[in-house]
Amino acid sequence: MDRLGGLWGSLPLAFLLLLGAAFNSAPGANAWSKEGHMITCKIAQSLLEPEAKEAVYHLLPGYVKGDLSALCVWPDQIRHWHKYSWTSPLHFIDTPDDACSFTYSRDCHDQHGVKDMCVAGAVKNFTSQLLHYREGTADRRYNMTEALLFLSHFMGDIHQPMHVGFTTDEGGNTIELRWFRHKSNLHHVWDREIIQTALADYYEKDVDQLLQDIERNYTDGIWSSDVSSWQHCSDISKCVTSWAKESIQIACKWGYNGVEAGETLADDYFNSRMPYVMKRIAQGGVRLAMILNQVFGSSEEGFAAAT
């Protein structure tokens, strides 16, 4: 994945200041909604240890005032720019239709067969780049900033079940249907519709209320006993495979199962699938914090650079 390294170094910091304006004008992208990615990054930032928190603050451009969530959507915006079109395959994984499985050597490649060009490969690569942060060089900040933003975003994507979907239907993108009263597709239902419906029905469209509810569920609620297992990762290569397998299994059992093109999905689908969407957002945030704490911490323990 040599192409994934070093791109940021040629860009002046002032260029970063223009990125915020892109969020409101760029075309929509197939990923967790803006809210989903922001919540993932807010969860992660709240769990950072002091050294990781300081590193993240210094790597972010000054105008976001240390708020990682403000730039977690950035990779979705620049994938439409010619300069960054190569990043498009890094947002997902296509798996064999109906196999309901993920094998890194079989599935992690782009449409031309270039290996490692998938979201699992991207998480490995940008984690490896960040492991060099403590070595310190005069111009490392731009490259490290890019790696931080990409890793933070792709940790959200790898936990979105339909981002590890079937090849023929492009992760549900070509399965057109209706979500309550409007047109949508199965991929978009998992990216955005479930989150937006939950916000409207239960949280008065207040993202902070939803975030607080998710945090309660993993601190002292229904997921609290699972958090320690979410945080366990000594080998990033094995971990990305595990996380992708989780996604395709959820996609098969809860995403695709029982869904036919042209039908209307409504309360039954929403109520039964919403807990899985919220849990995946929580897992993405907790695991992103785990990675950042390991790569930026001073402990000698942690995973080695991925190969």
Image (cartoon, rainbow, N blue to C red):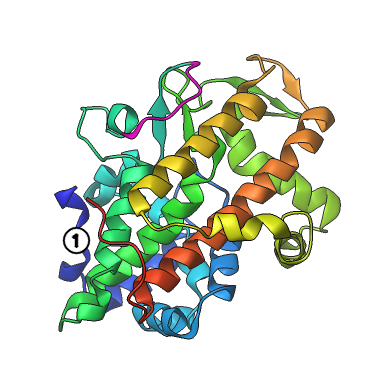
Splitting the image into 4 quarters, where does residue 184 fall? Answer: top right
Residue in the image at 64% along x and 26% along y: 253
Residue where numbered disc 1 is placed: 7
Amino acid marked by disc 1 = Leu
Tell me if I can see residue 219 in this picture. Answer: yes
- Magenta highlight: main SS: loop
Q: Between residues 153 and 183, which one lies in front from this camera angle?
A: 153
Q: Is residue 292 magenta?
A: no
Is residue 167 placed above or below 205 in the rendered structure? Answer: above
- Residue 140 coordinates in the image, percent (x, y): 20, 76
- Residue 265 coordinates in the image, percent (x, y): 75, 25
Q: Between residues 24 and 8, which one lies in front from this camera angle?
A: 8
Residue in the image at 81% along x and 37% along y: 271
- Residue 158 coordinates in the image, percent (x, y): 47, 45
Left or right? Give the position of 255 relative to 205.
Answer: left
For label 1, the SS is loop
Splitting the image into 4 quarters, where does residue 187 fall? Answer: top right
Residue in the image at 33% along x and 38% along y: 89
Residue in the image at 54% along x and 38% along y: 246
Tell me if I can see residue 185 in this picture. Answer: no
Looking at the rendering, the stretch of residues picked out in magenta corresponds to 98-104
